Amino acid sequence: MENIKIAPSVLSADFSAMGAAAEKLEKCGADWVHCDVMDGSFVPKITFGADMVAAIGRHTSLPLDVHLMIVHPEKHIETFAEAGASVITVHHEACGADLKNVLKRIAAAGVRAGAVINPETPLKEVYGCLDYCDMLLVMSVFPGLGGQKFIESVLPKVEEARKIFDGQGVFKDIEIDGGVGEQNVRRVKEAGANVIVAGSSVFGAADMKKAIENLRSL
Ligand code: DX5
Ligand code: ZN
């Protein structure tokens, strides 16, 4: 798999020192900063909103990959665009039949658009939206918490999506999020994912630079 991008999740960073975390990620060779926005409704936890995304952006020039785990994401697209998001991903499970319109709205805001599917959601649920995606995010844990175990059974969806994009003659990013580390990154890439989110395996590593390098090269 070419075009590998490592997108560490600041969900596993020290929330009192987000700026420093973003600076460190950039220094250690990360490609994107993955920002997990949780609202206490779509998922039980509340993390942070657009002001934090903007604050992170003041400490790094890396693209901000904003993963919205919120209900009614359509209400907040422009706010996150103004906060400096490079990519905004929204859940099929939050948008339902409106997903296509929300993706269009993200694009209209000048931001790359991504659809997200939870581990139990079949890819066919979003077939009709793939043309409107710059990226597909396949969750490999149930959204809401860092440090969970990787769910192997999502990999056929990654393979299927890569086949669909290849069949269309386009290269689109396929991102995988949850439980990814050195032990499984190779399989994830073989399946066709090229954007690797990693929270605990990067922030929990003794050597962050080495951890990012290994995720890229393995
Ligand atoms: C889970 C988040 C993930 C999470 C990944 O809801 O979307 O981005 O932070 O963390 P790890 O890599 O620890 O599973
Ligand atoms: Zn995420």
Image: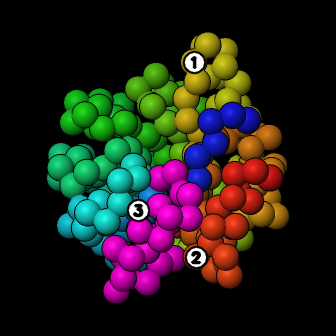
Mark seen at residue 112: none
- Disc 1, ligand 2: is the CB inside 8 Å? no
Q: Is residue 185 above or below residue 55?
A: above
In the rendering, at what x and y percent does residue 104 appear?
Answer: 29, 30
Quarter of the render that holds ligand 1 = bottom right
Q: Are marks 1 and 3 in contact (CB under 8 Å)?
A: no
Which residue is found at the position 67% from the left and 15% from the top? Answer: 167
Q: Are marks 3 and 2 in contact (CB under 8 Å)?
A: no
Task: Say what secondary structure mark 3 lies in.
Answer: strand
| Residue bearing mark 3 | 35
The 10 Å Cα crowd at callout 1, few under 14, some 14 to 19, many 20 or more, is few
Spatial separation of the CA atoms under disc 1 and disc 2: 33 Å
In the rendering, at what x and y percent does residue 199 appear?
Answer: 57, 69
Residue nearest the observer in this picture, 72 or 22: 22
Mark seen at residue 203: 2
Residue nearest the observer in this picture, 157 or 182: 182
Q: Amino acid at mark 3?
A: Cys
Spatial separation of the CA atoms under disc 3 and disc 2: 14 Å
Q: Is residue 50 above or below residue 84?
A: below
Spatial separation of the CA atoms under disc 1 and disc 3: 26 Å
Task: Say what secondary structure mark 2 lies in.
Answer: helix
Q: Amino acid at mark 2?
A: Phe
Q: Is residue 139 visible?
A: no
Mark seen at residue 170: 1
54 displayed left or right of 213: left
In the rendering, at what x and y percent does residue 119 appear?
Answer: 63, 54
Q: Amino acid at mark 1?
A: Val
Which coloring applies here? rainbow
Work out which quarter of the rendered image holds the N terminus and state it. top right
Identify the magenta region: 9-32
146 displayed left or right of 105: right
